[in-house]
Image (cartoon, rainbow, N blue to C red):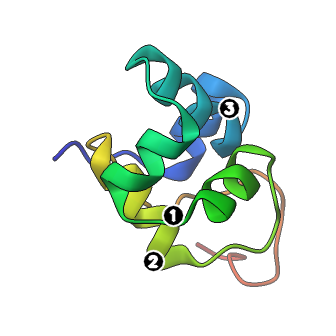
Amino acid sequence: MRRRNLEQLTQETGTLANFVRSKRKSLGYSQLKLSQRTGVGLRFLKELELGKKTLRMDKVEQVLNFFGFTLAPAPIERKSPFNEGL
């Protein structure tokens, strides 16, 4: 499985929602078919593609794994008190 972090995914597609939508469409899948193939609910998939801010990470991971991707931590560019001195 290719390990890609969320930052790389969003740089390439704009948002996670756009990434999932574009991958789904490239396969010619409807939202219903993708939800069935990944084991997530249709409502969840619709909310994911609409960019809902609060989603279950395990279900997001299920969808990304179907496409050969995974969630992973990525550094951010802004200054944070948590990464000072690193």
Q: Is mark 2 on a helix, strand or loop?
A: helix
Looking at the rendered structure, the kind of residue marked 3 is Asn
Give the quarter of the image for residue 65. bottom left
Which amino acid type is shown beneath numbered disc 1?
Answer: Val
| Rendered image: mark on residue 17 | none
* Marking on residue 18: 3
Label 1 close to label 2 by CB (< 8 Å): yes
- Element type at mark 1: helix
In three-dimensional space, the C-alpha distance between marks 2 and 3, rounded to whole angstroms, equals 19 Å
Q: Which residue is drawn at 37% across and 63% down?
A: 62
Q: Please identify the quadrant where the C terminus is shown.
A: bottom right
Q: Tell which of 7 and 32 is nearer to you.
A: 32
Q: Mark 1 points at which residue?
A: 60
At label 2, the amino acid type is: Asp
From this view, report whether residue 18 is shown above or below residue 3: above
Q: Within 10 Å of the Cα at label 1, are there few (<14), some (14-19), or many (20+) other Cα atoms?
A: some
| Picture residue at 83% right of the left edge, 64% below the top | 79
Coordinates of residue 56 in the picture (x, y in percent): 60, 78
Residue designated by label 2: 58
**Between residues 24 and 70, which one lies in front from this camera angle?**
24
